[in-house]
Image (cartoon, helix red, strand yellow):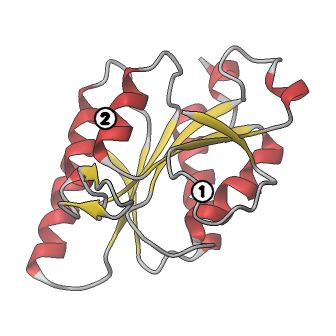
């Protein structure tokens, strides 16, 4: 992963990136922030909610690891940095293509949920799903909840809703404290 400061607005930059607080603040914690969040995004838009959320959370000490495929997420989970909260886009592809466009769209998200559920200490997980009332959407929701999803947010993602769900996840899983302070 290549660290990337949150104030870098470069659209189209590598999707596997880390957004963190200023370097002087990052040194105060072993993992580089108060909370490490994995954010997966299977979309293609520049300046999406997935680009804005890390910039809003960085001043609070949230370090965001952005992944754009199931393979990138797997590598991140195998690293030594703990993940305290995960946002999983069900439209996440398994592998990125060589040209930057993803392949096997939508299969990486459910597999990532399975990987997170198998961790020794699974983080609270927020699932982003396609809005709709189809049978397939209902089945995906049931599977996500079966793998321990804390909440599901429909596309298009409202940033205020996502921030509220993030706050509720912190309250429920970490008793309104940062992970290193609570347990």
Q: Which residue is mark 1?
A: 13
The percent position of residue 169, horizontal first and vertical second, equals 53, 47
Going by the image, does 87 lie left or right of 27?
A: left
- Rounded to the nearest angstrom, the CA distance separating label 1 from label 2 is 26 Å
The answer, for residue 147, to whether it is visible in the render is no
Please report the residue visible at 32 percent of the width from the left and 33 percent of the height from the top. Answer: 74
The image quadrant where one finds the C terminus is top right
Report crowding for label 1: few under 14, some 14 to 19, many 20 or more residues within 10 A (C-alpha): few
Give the number of marks: 2
Asked if residue 40 shows in the view, the reply is: yes
Q: Position of residue 58 (x, y in %)?
A: 76, 46
Residue 122 location in percent, x, y?
A: 37, 29
Q: Residue at x 75, y 58 (%)?
A: 56
Question: Which residue sits at x=35%, y=60%?
Answer: 99
Circles 1 and 2 in contact, beta carbons < 8 Å = no
Q: Earlier in the sequence, mark 1 or mark 2?
A: 1
Looking at the image, which residue sits at the far bottom? Answer: 133
Neighbourhood count class around disc 2 (C-alpha, 10 Å): few under 14, some 14–19, many 20 upward: many
As drawn, 87 above or below 23: below
Q: Quadrant of the N terminus?
A: top right
* Numbered disc 1: secondary structure: loop
Quarter of the view holding residue 154: bottom left
Name the quadrant containing residue 37. top right
Residue behind mark 2: 116
- Relative placement, left or right, of 51 versus 122 is right
User: Label for residue 130?
Assistant: none
Q: Nearer the viewer, mark 1 or mark 2?
A: 1
């Amino acid at each position: 992963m290549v660290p990337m400061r949150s104030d870098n607005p470069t659209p189209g930059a590598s999707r596997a990136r880390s957004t963190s607080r200023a370097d002087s603040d990052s040194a105060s914690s072993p993992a580089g922030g108060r909370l490490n969040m994995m954010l997966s995004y299977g979309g293609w838009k520049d300046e999406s909610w997935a680009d804005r959320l890390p910039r809003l959370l960085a001043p609070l000490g949230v370090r965001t690891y952005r992944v754009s495929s199931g393979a990138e997420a797997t590598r991140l989970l195998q690293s030594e940095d703990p993940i305290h909260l995960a946002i999983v886009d069900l439209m996440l592809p398994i592998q990125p293509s060589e040209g930057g466009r993803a392949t096997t769209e939508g299969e990486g998200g459910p597999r990532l949920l399975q990987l997170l559920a198998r961790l020794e200490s699974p983080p609270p997980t927020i699932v982003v799903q396609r809005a709709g009332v189809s049978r397939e959407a209902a089945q995906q929701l049931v599977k996500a909840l079966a793998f321990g999803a804390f909440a599901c947010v429909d596309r298009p993602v409202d940033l205020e809703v996502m921030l509220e769900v993030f706050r509720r996840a912190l309250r429920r899983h970490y008793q309104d404290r940062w992970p290193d302070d609570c347990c």
